[in-house]
Image: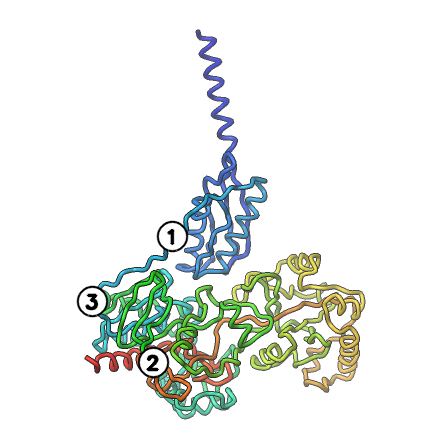
Amino acid sequence: MKKGLSVLVALVLAMAMGACALAEDYTATAKGFGGDVTVTLTIEDGKLTAAAAEGPNETDGIGSKAIEQLPAAMVAKNSVEVDTYASATVTSNAVLTAAAEALAQSGVTLTPVETVEEAPQCAKPSFENPDVIVVGAGFSGMNAALEAAENGAKVYLIDKNDDMGGSIRFAGGTTSAAGARMQIEAGVEDSPENFAEDIVRMGGGTNVPELTKKHTENAAAAIDWLDDLGADFGDRQPQMSSSYDAFNVPREYRVTGGGKAMANLVRPLIEEQVAQGNISLMLNSEVADIILEDGVVKGVVMVDGTEYRAAATILATGGYGHNEELLHRYNYANVLTMSPSFVTGDGYVFAEKAGAVFNNMDYLPAYPGGVPVGGFDVSCTASVKYPGVIWVDNTGNRMVKEQDNLDSERKAAYANAPENLVYMVLTQEMKDTQDPILSVGGGFSGKTDEGWTYFDQLLAEGNCVYYGETIEEVAEKAGIDAAGLAATVTKYNEYVASGEDKDFGRPAETMVALEGPFYVIKTCPYVMLTKGGPLMNPDAQVLNADHDPILGLYECGELAGGANIGGSANIGGLANTSCIVWGKIAGASAAAYALAGK
């Protein structure tokens, strides 16, 4: 009996140890928005039993939610192929990439659990019969809803995401105004008229004068309001623009903590109005359409089919920076994006249905240096200030002074290049003696390509990075006219020898003779904000083709078109400030219209 019992115990232990041996962990890492994202999968008996992700440098409240939510979705589906988190595409893609690599390590093929697609569900309002509906709870929508409520309206604030803030949560903290309290304290003389003149000078006159006037007259009050709410403006000194073409006087003010800090200052004011029953905040709720009757906008239709009617509707839906079809239609043949995945141009569709007329849609000053290694979202960029490099188009011709240039000149080179492709030419000597030219992770959040590792990987794949012993060889591999590029390099080397760039005036100290072997990097523009939009009047009413107001329809934020206000230029701090200025104007105007009809 004892012998039999011992054998039985041994068998049970062996089975238990065997079962434990079936559960193994596999870990992999990928580049996220702010740094490395690490995913660990637990595979047991051919199934995904656990998953965990870590990304300490991902944006709190945005990327961190992808880190939290995607692993659970993978376990529930028994697959590493799940939908991305809407507000954090780059972080989501990093989680999915790392998970796929971890799964590959295991050698296991997972069988996804079949799920029944649920009908869309939307939040229910906390009261009936709103006066104003605000579509989009980004920063401009927050300000619009707040202003409408403070002007006596009952407001529905609706957003398809699970939190307020929208795109500004990804933005820097730059604002701008003439005559703000901080500028006066610093002794800087300025005026709205001076600001407007700067916009015309910098923007080429494509702005709508009455919108520019309204904005410049109200911007100072918007900045002072942020100041009163407790925004941290650091040393409170107005600055000249450091990122874009310069103003004629210092009028930028930078909020510590960026756009997210601005949204967090307004959040408690919204919550207070919600508590008082003046605003119904409806998150995770997507608007599918507007209600249009006899040319008048009467409300919205949700994705679940529910209709909500109100006298006034404000579109605060953001731009179209994550809508590839619209970007190709209006702007670029080749383009990448850093816009959040929820910025899909919904408001443009709604406004078009209502009969809106669009303006400045052809202007979009995308950022230079995106490397189209695969996919629509930016995952790799090349330095646009890299020492020694020249830029050419697919004919092999240079197009810009590559060093000591303006932001607008760099962007114009990409906008005007055939197919919007710009090729950077560098040499083996540069690679051997200088820091890596690529950043990995996307745009401003990218991390330097340590030891040229990613560069070499792309080169081996023939993916946007090419090598040649001669200039003709590398041109052919990159798809550039070989004779044209050879002629350009010969002429450029002559300019180097003479110390004078006769084509573009590049400073002699930045010019280096180009001698083989050579490398070429294919690059294209990438976007963050879009700049065109439906025309509106100074009361934020959307206009039709006859420039008459479309009754019941208002707009604010990125949808309204930064170029309509600031012209064909990146005006430092204009976008963030516009969310306050035009959010408040739209909210007050919509409330007045709605309440006048009662």
x, y percent for residue 166: 39, 67
Q: Secondary structure at mark 2?
A: loop
Looking at the picture, the colour scheme in use is rainbow
Q: Is residue 431 visible?
A: yes
Q: Secondary structure at mark 3?
A: loop
Q: Residue 383 sits in which quadrant?
A: bottom right
Q: Please, what is the three-letter code of the amino acid marked with disc 2? A: Gly
Residue in view at x 51 percent, y 56 percent: 93
Q: Is residue 181 visible?
A: no
Give the number of the mark in front: 3 or 1. Answer: 1
Give the number of the mark in front: 2 or 1. Answer: 2
Residue in view at x 49 percent, y 30 percent: 20
Q: Which mark is residue 277?
A: 3
* In the rendered image, the vertical position of residue 353 relative to residue 307, given as above or below: below
Q: Which mark is residue 295?
A: 2
Q: Earlier in the sequence, mark 3 or mark 2?
A: 3
x, y percent for residue 86: 44, 60
How far is the residue under mark 3 from the one under mark 2? 31 Å
Label 1: which residue?
118
